[in-house]
Amino acid sequence: MKLKGFAAAAALLASGLASAVTPVTVNAGAYSITYDGAAASDFVLSHVTAAGFEWSFKDVQLQSFAAGAVTRELLLPDFTVTANAGWNLGSSLSSSAGNVVFFEFGPSASTHLTAGGTLSVLNGSTYVLPQTPLVKSSGGYFHGSSSAPLGDAAGFTIKDAKLVLTATAGANSLAAITGQSQNNVAYAFTAQAVPEPETYALLMAGLGVIGFVARRRRG
């Protein structure tokens, strides 16, 4: 009886673990995005187009009023992008984050925002992107971008991607960073149609005919 009870408990636990992962797949025509819809995340998938997609911020407010350094990590879910049949994802992937507003008031106020993660190209290389500071604009917002080679890959995976926000303020100072739904982390690439073998055969045959005609004319 005890063994039966243990087996039932183990089966229930396994079922619970399996149900905890909720894969979501979005088909964009040339490619598909798959991610865990149940994973803790500070972003929502949005603006999916043929040229890429964006993760929009959930509303976030980080501030320090004479409270020293205050830090918060914003996590993206791990996700995989796979080219659909007849397509590849082009030669490079670019990522960007922008329009995240900051505010600094007082002699010891400062704000910082860094971004990083890991890119694994299907049947290719893995790139660890260390936490890199975004640039502050004179208009009062952060922005930054980076790129990595894909080599016409059929897919890639992004893991452990996150933004780290830090607001620091000493006496008589206020520092704040605000993220809203219009702010985003964007990924862009150029999906390309892969010619079918029959297309290559017709192309080579056509080139052969053109070459034959050219030789006849020269003769």
Image (spheres, rainbow, N blue to C red):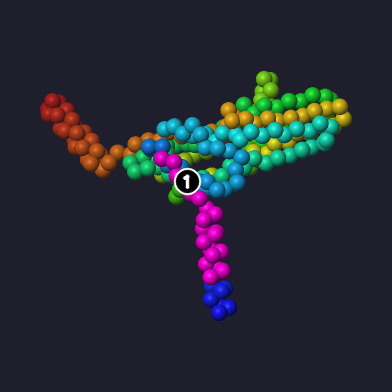
User: Residue 41, position in %: x, y?
Assistant: 60, 43
Q: Quadrant of residue 216?
A: top left
Q: Is residue 72 above or below residue 8?
A: above
195 to the left or right of 185: left
User: In the orientation shown, which residue stands out farthest toward the bottom?
Assistant: 1
Q: Quadrant of residue 51?
A: top left
Query: Is 18 covered by the magenta stretch?
Result: yes
Q: Main secondary structure of the magenta part?
A: helix
Q: Which span is picked out in magenta?
A: 8-27
User: Residue 217, position in %: x, y?
Assistant: 13, 25
Residue at 49% across, 39% down: 149
| Residue 157 visible somewhere in the drawing | no
Q: Is residue 174 above or below residue 36?
A: above
| Residue 197 visible somewhere in the drawing | yes
Residue at 70% across, 27% down: 102
User: Residue 135, position in %: x, y?
Assistant: 66, 28
Q: Secondary structure at mark 1?
A: strand
Image quarter of the C terminus: top left
User: In the orientation shown, which residue stands out farthest toward the top?
Assistant: 139
- Judging depth in this view, the residue of 194 and 100 nearest the camera is 100
Residue to which mark 1 is pinned: 24
Residue at 73% across, 25% down: 103
157 to the left or right of 144: left
Image quarter of the N terminus: bottom right
- Judging depth in this view, the residue of 40 and 191 nearest the camera is 40
Density class for disc 1 (Cα within 10 Å; few <14, some 14-19, many ≥20) is: few
Query: Is 79 covered by the magenta stretch?
Result: no
User: In the orientation shown, which residue stands out farthest toward the right?
Assistant: 171
Given the image, on which type of amino acid does mark 1 rest? Val
122 to the left or right of 97: left
